[in-house]
Amino acid sequence: MVVEIAAIVDENGCSGVLNEPGQVVVYRHVQGAWEIDRAMEVSLDRSRNLREMRLKMGEILQFMNECRIFVARAAGGALYFELEKAGCSIWEIAGNPVDALDIVLEDEEKERVERVAAQSQGTTGIPTPCEQAPGVFFISIREAQGKAPEISSKQILQRFVAEGNFSVLEILCDHVPPWIEMEARKRNYAMMTEKTGQNEVMVRLTKKTA
């Protein structure tokens, strides 16, 4: 099986930011080592309008071909959403991306195995939001991942958020997972965030009434 991971790389060879000039490099796993398979110069600066950015992201995705793992120092906003819509798994990693590719691959495989297990056995072992009042749910991602660090926020919440069987959903976390922002926009939920402590944020999703 061909394994590829893409990364945005700056002029110093470190993982970069999508809206800054750099190269998209696709690494291929060959006989236990990572090799550069192809590279593409990119410049997604903030002066571009949304349409231009989407067109450029389309070119990047076409260049990536079937590769759907992407590494950046930081990713957010419209560019993150374009990657997420294309089904990419996005990793935020500082430093030389090559140093982290084995870890990314290992964690990707772990998540794949857990998804398969969850689908075949139901959601046993994965915490779910607790209903505190009719239609009002709460979950602490911090607490859940403290007990089971191998479980991602997506595994815990994505299906619940997508199904929308709530009027208000409160999520306590260390930071706002970008995929939650995307789901809120996609499903037209109102979203508010409140810093409640050091490295602690409360995210509140509310279903908009017609």
Image: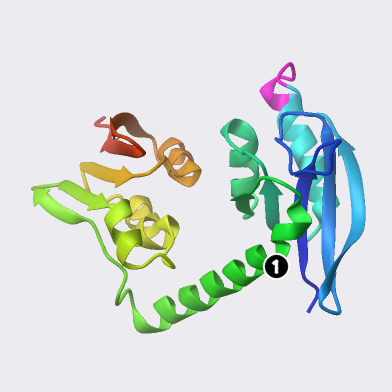
**Would you say residue 112 sits in the magenta stretch?**
no
* Residue annotated with mark 1: 102
Colouring used for the render: rainbow
Q: Residue at x 31, y 30 (%)?
A: 195
**Image quadrant for the C terminus?**
top left
Is 161 left or right of 16, judged from the image as shown? left
Q: Position of residue 71 (x, y in %)?
A: 69, 50
**Would you say residue 49 sits in the magenta stretch?**
yes
Residue 67 visible here:
no
**Label 1 secondary element:** helix
Residue 177 visible here:
yes
- Residue toward you, 118 or 107: 107
Give the residue type at disc 1. Answer: Asp
Is 135 left or right of 44, judged from the image as shown? left
Tell me the magenta residue range. 46-51
Q: Position of residue 142 (x, y in %)?
A: 32, 52
Q: Total of numbered circles in the picture?
A: 1
Is 56 left or right of 112, judged from the image as shown? right
Q: Residue at x 77, y 41 (%)?
A: 58
Task: Give the answer, above or below, for where 93 lies relative to 55.
Answer: below
Task: Give the answer, above or below, for where 50 lies relative to 104.
Answer: above
